[in-house]
Amino acid sequence: MKEFGKLIEVDDATRKFWAIFQPGYPERMVEVAEKKRRFAYYTNADTALKVISNKELWFRNATVMNDFSEISYGIDLIHKVFSGEAGERFREAVEDIFEGTISLVDKRLQGWMHDWELETYIACISEHSEDEDKSGRLSMWRAYGDTALVVNNAPMMAFTDKLAVYSAPVMYLSEDGYKARLDQITDAILINRKYLQSLGQDTLVTYIHHMLFHTAIVTKHPGFSEEREWRLFYRPNEEHSAAMERRVEVLGGVIQIVYVLPLKHDPKVGLFGADVPSLLDRVIIGPTE
């Protein structure tokens, strides 16, 4: 079971997992698909030109991106909330299904959280609306550059396990916001206790692992909410992609590893409608001479 993938092809078990452990995720995917939402990749003109001419998108390590706390924020939030009342309620609900489950989750997480922070490669895009077609979004120009590539949503809806690159909307949560979300998840666990018990303890441990991973990867401070960010991410330590090329590049004076996603239509490796002519809707030039 993968927590991200092509929405229309997921099985009932995955949909049930989303409903219990990732509330709101499938609704966001359906909204993007039904409303044919587009996305914008805000960057500088040099990078935008390279994306188009080289037909590739770079995924950078989370530790060297604009906000160095890209993943550490979500991990810190997990530690804070799970050490409090909401975390205790969650643990009690899980232990009531299978005693010892939390201990097994803790054992599995040893080392993984550190790896999530250090070995996750990300490309960030932003939900785009029609009223931004001409001028873009001021806050994004201020933060990310002078050029926006507006793209169609087909690849976002069709990234599959075969590609091993996944997409998800960012959650903008404060500590109180995550407490409320965890309480919502706990309520769903209590309602679906018999169903989760029928799956067995190993599956329940895996589900909780995926839930925590999702929180770590896609949670940001509410102060960034205007970005309406979605993340494309690749985890080479967990899953290899035949489509992704590993390179060493110098960016901003920093030598770093990047993974390169070719922009082409190649269903054999899990790429759907990702070729530049199909993908690119428009280019917006922001405030610049």
Image (tube, helix red, strand yellow):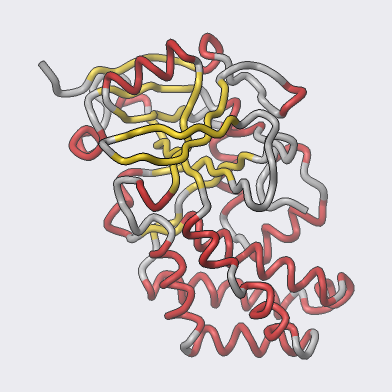
In front: 96, or 120? 120
In front: 244, or 31? 244
Q: Is residue 105 above or below residue 269?
A: below
Q: Position of residue 47 (x, y in %)?
A: 34, 23
Q: Position of residue 114 (x, y in %)?
A: 51, 66
Is residue 79 found left or right of 134 in the rendered image?
Answer: right
- Which quadrant of the figure has residue 262? top right
Q: Position of residue 5 (x, y in %)?
A: 69, 42
In front: 5, or 18? 5
Residue appearing at x 48%, y 54% in the figure: 218
Q: Position of residue 228 (x, y in %)?
A: 38, 44
Residue appearing at x 40%, y 32% in the figure: 249
Residue appearing at x 82%, y 48% in the figure: 11
Is residue 48 found left or right of 253 in the rendered image?
Answer: right
- Which quadrant of the figure has residue 265? top right
Q: Quadrant of the C terminus?
A: top left
Q: Is residue 283 above or below residue 235?
A: above
Q: Is residue 126 above or below residue 261?
A: below
Residue appearing at x 35%, y 15% in the figure: 49
Total marks placed? 0
